[in-house]
Amino acid sequence: MSEKNFVYVGVNDREIDLFEGMYDVPNGMAYNSYVIRGEKTAVMDTVDGRFVEKWLDNVADALDGKAADYLIVQHMEPDHSAGIEAFAKKYPDAKIVGNTKTFAMLGEYFDGLDLEGRKVVVKEGDSLDLGGHKLRFVFAPMVHWPEVMFTFDESAGVLYSADAFGKFGAKGTDEDWACEARRYYFGIVGKYGVQVQSVLKKAAALDIKTICPLHGEILTDNLGYYVGLYDTWSAYKPEAEGVTIAYTSVYGHTAEAVMLLKAELEKTGVKVPLFDLARCDMSEAVEDAFKYGKIVLATTTYNGEIFPFMRTFISALVERGYKNRTVAFIENGTWAPMAQKVMRGMLEGCKELKFAENNVTLHAAMKDGDKSAIKALAEELK
Ligand code: FEO
């Protein structure tokens, strides 16, 4: 795909089963890379190791006989850096641009790669003039690794934003941007809201007309929409009204209770995404836990603890700095219910959580009294 200010040289990955070894990507994944052609040329990042040959062909086509002057390394995670050595060998006169952290990591991945005399080490705010395209480096530490930097093409108003504003799904997939960008954000970058907020403040000072992330789509219109969502997500603010229910159930009794709660809430018009944590894609449940302002955690007491899928789920929330939400519990235990105490304990370090008052304790099967308790909880959460 050709654009006025850059040429797209990335690749779509439709073979991948799990992105980062964990995330289901039914519509594949894109590893984006771009060539900027001024009087000098710059290649923005590389791609995943399985696609380096194809990417090198794309780069050669985009250069169209021009020399490759610079490879700008915005992020050293291998989905973007795997082609550095092959590029350096194919284009021995090209310089490699990064910061001190970039080159420290580069040495770890490419032991013995000699870049003597070819490294351009940049600092925050430094610029690189290609002639016709003046690039400025905007550091974005921990979005999503410490060496990450954005690059702003001041001449064209193009922000090359590394992982930020990326999404799951091959480029060109016809799907809602926010859905897969949100799942990507909370899965991968969600822990680093403070750092995202800080780079958004820097970005606010730039006159951005186009955003070129390393995954997903190139964003050209209505940029306020995308930036606004990133602001909401990174500030840990709920994006929408609703009550997420995440549950596990061994013999169906806890499931019966959450179905009743869902029905009671929906009667009053509340949106209720429901996740069986043993069977769902857990990254979807994490996404909705952050999207909505209220959550119900329902699980069984198990070995004096909680059911393992619930432990994994709550750990995922805690790791990502879950906060500023209302949390309710439904616990089940035939002889010694412990689940509520364990779940609450896991959330202890989370800030600005409000715990519901009408939490529910089931002893095995749901009885009439439990139904009344669930209705009371619905009343509190609606
Ligand atoms: Fe797409 Fe953090 O790598």
Image (tube, rainbow, N blue to C red):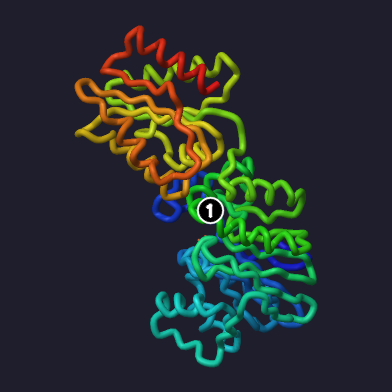
The residue type indicated by label 1 comes to Met
Residue occupying the far top of the picture: 368
Q: Mark 1 points at which residue?
A: 29
Relative placement, left or right, of 103 versus 165 is left
Q: Is residue 11 in view?
A: no
Q: In which quarter of the image is residue 62?
A: bottom right
Residue 264 in the image, given as x and y percentages of width and height: 50, 15
Q: Which residue is drawn at 51% across and 75% down?
A: 102
Q: Is residue 316 above or below residue 65?
A: above
Q: Is residue 212 in view?
A: yes
Q: In this view, does 378 lie above or below 341?
A: above
Q: In which quarter of the image is residue 347?
A: top left
Residue 13 in the image, given as x and y percentages of width and height: 52, 55
**Quadrant including the N terminus:** bottom right
Mark 1 neighbour class, 10 Å CA radius: few under 14, some 14 to 19, many 20 or more: many
Mark 1 CB near ligand 1 (8 Å cut): no
| Closest to the observer, 279 or 151 | 151
Count of numbered circles on the image: 1
**Quadrant including the C terminus:** top right
Relative placement, left or right, of 93 versus 49 is right
Relative placement, left or right, of 273 versus 361 is right
Secondary structure of the residue carrying numbered label 1: strand
